[in-house]
Image: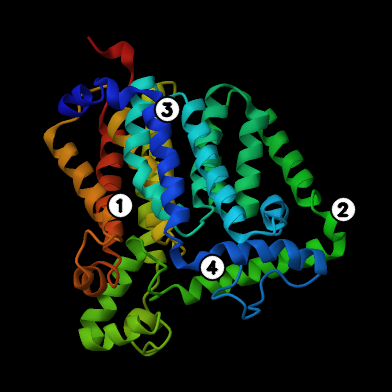
Amino acid sequence: MNKLSRLIQLPFWRNKWTQFSLWMLMVAISVGLHMHNFNNFLIYKYTFWHALQGRSLFENYGDHGDVNHYGPIFSLIIAPFAVIPSLWVGVALWHLALALFLWWAIKKSTLTTEQKVVVIWLTAHEMLNALGMSQFNVATAAMILLTYTAIRQGKDMWAAFWIVLGTLVKIYGIVGLAFFFFARSKSKFMMWLIIWTIVLIALPMPFFGVEYELEQYVEWFRCLSEKSQENMLSDFQNISLLGMVRKIGYAVTAGLSAYYEVFANAGKQFDATNWWVSTWSDLWIIIPAMIYSALPWLRFNQYRAHSFQLMCLALVLIIVNILSTGSENSSYIISMLGVAIWYIAVPWKRGRLDMVLLVFCFILTSLSPTDLFPGDVRYYCIRPFALKSLPVTIIWLKLVWEMCTKDYRESNRS
């Protein structure tokens, strides 16, 4: 790690109170800036009240600018924050809870003290991006990390809990199943998955009713299916490898001016006859990408190496965004956590190219949504073509190649 390793040895960077103060500063800034008028929090808040009233969780009621896309159990999770009369207090406590949850997940992880320092500093700004929109993605990142930690520590019950909870809230949690191969007792792990699925689906029923909850799950799946189609050329969605390819392809074939018009209308007024809309399928990327990403799992002799398992964790955290049409600005807290683990958790010294990729990722992925980038660059270049995903995609390609060719077993190193 060279320069970075020497830097984090300085007391300022390693001091736990400095790190915690940084985390709390992100919370304070996210609330103080009053980003987006807390529209997302209002959506979350009303899922609880709509559930109490027996109303659909997935209708657009017109009192905020979007609809809910989280599973029915989320209405119970948000309840303690929804009942707070003051919007500012509710938002502040929600942001604080999200930040503390991720902080706890990092501190509970099997990373070394030095690795945790790097992860905290590298992910702080991306966490601010997510908190600025009150997004649950911070908790999603924490749950995926906690899933691996529990698997590594042989706590199958908790690993299954985090997978099921994450899946029932926002689907992304299902990627934790990738760690099944590292479970010490696979039958016990599967048993807990079934138990937690039954328990967590049933948990809201005493509060909101059995029939209502089952209806909302059916409606949720329908809503997610429709959302995938809406995301194709969306302004703030599909910030992924899939989106980058589709959006650049559409712009090249339709012309920049025509594409910018689509972009200005949040991706709604597109030419349905354009090949990139009518014919192109994301599966032409998803299937080869999933096969490529699965190759490291064939290296059975590496399974017990802690560093190899951490790279599997990094890989899962990264592909959550680059292979999803639902990826957005705020969801990159998940992938930035993966990028940080990719850089810091290998049993060899990272080279100059790796440092360049890390800096490139931090600048283009984490900083590009901010005012540090000129407005025209953001609006006419980065956002329309989903370039936020580019550095993470490159790191994903390199990560899989490393996992297929490198030896992660410490015992084989001199």
User: Residue 353, located in which quarter of the rendered image?
Assistant: top left
Dot 3 corresponds to which residue? 300
Question: Quadrant of residue 327 in the image?
Answer: bottom left
Position of 338 with respect to 252 (left or right) is: right
Q: Are marks 1 and 3 in contact (CB under 8 Å)?
A: no
According to the image, label 1 marks what residue? 366
Q: Position of residue 213 (x, y in %)?
A: 79, 61
Amino acid type, residue under disc 2 in the picture: Pro
Q: Is residue 251 visible?
A: yes
How many angstroms separate mark 3 from mark 4 (CA)? 47 Å
Q: Residue flagged by tag 1: what amino acid is it?
A: Ser
Q: CA distance from mark 1 to mark 2?
A: 42 Å
In the rendered structure, which amino acid carries the disc numbered 4?
A: Asn
Within-10-Å neighbours for mark 4: few <14, some 14–19, many 20+: some
Q: Secondary structure at mark 3?
A: helix
Image point (72%, 54%), residue name: 79
To which residue does mark 4 refer?
A: 39
Whether label 3 touches label 2, CB < 8 Å: no
Residue 298: x %, y % from top left? 40, 35
